[in-house]
Amino acid sequence: MYGAHSVLAFNGLRRGEISGDTVMSFDAATRFEFRGFRAQFTTTLGRPLSNLTAPAGTYRIASAPVMAHGKVTITSDTTRRRIDGVAVQYDIATNRLASDSPFVATSGTRKLSGVGFTADPGLFSVKCLQRCTGSLSP
């Protein structure tokens, strides 16, 4: 499929939307592989929180994780924070972003880097897991 998109929802709560330039369906239409992957995370009322872009992404309907691969960039619409990494997972059930790969987070002139992080979709709270240097706090 070309130019496909889907709504991310859990228990009737809208969490955002994912889209791709090209989308391929596998495993009896339960796994979707995206090229030119984009995700917009929103509040339950539809207000934008952040945008994620990556060269590739995977969405599995049964277990509901969304994986982004390649040069992943997440930019917050509200906090002006940014995270760059190579692999990020979004868990729809817990509404959390997570990674176990190297990343760099920036907020203005402040910078946090390390290996692995957890964050909310608005990037209000970014927690580094290992080899942490720097801080996003003023």
Image: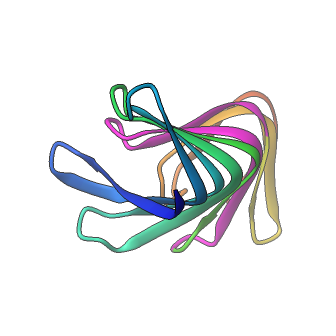
Identify which residue is drawn at 38% across, 43% down. Answer: 95
Does the segment drawn in magenta span residue 82? yes
The quarter of the displayed image where residue 117 is located: top right
The quarter of the displayed image where residue 81 is located: bottom right
Q: Position of residue 49 (x, y in %)?
A: 46, 67
Does the segment drawn in magenta span residue 132? no
Q: Which quarter of the image is occupied by the C terminus?
A: bottom right
Identify which residue is drawn at 51% across, 60% down. Answer: 19
Q: Position of residue 123 (x, y in %)?
A: 55, 56
Whether residue 93 sits left or right of residue 110 in the image: it is left
| Image position of 39 with respect to 126: above or below | below
Q: What residue range appears in magenta?
A: 78-102
For the question of whether residue 134 can be seen, the reply is: no
The quarter of the displayed image where residue 14 is located: bottom left
Identify which residue is drawn at 47% across, 49% down. Answer: 120
- Could you say which is closer to the camera, residue 76 or residue 68? 68
Characterize the magenta stretch by its predominant secondary structure. strand
For the question of whether residue 34 can be seen, the reply is: yes
| Image position of 17 with respect to 91: above or below | below
Query: How many callouts does the rendering have?
Result: 0
| Image position of 115 with respect to 68: above or below | above
Residue at the left extreme of this rendering: 12
Identify which residue is drawn at 48% across, 54% down. Answer: 121
- Could you say which is closer to the camera, residue 106 or residue 2? 2
Q: Position of residue 15 (x, y in %)?
A: 33, 55
Q: How is the image coloured?
A: rainbow
Whether residue 85 sits left or right of residue 74 in the image: it is right
Q: Position of residue 71 (x, y in %)?
A: 80, 50
Whether residue 60 sits left or right of residue 87 in the image: it is left
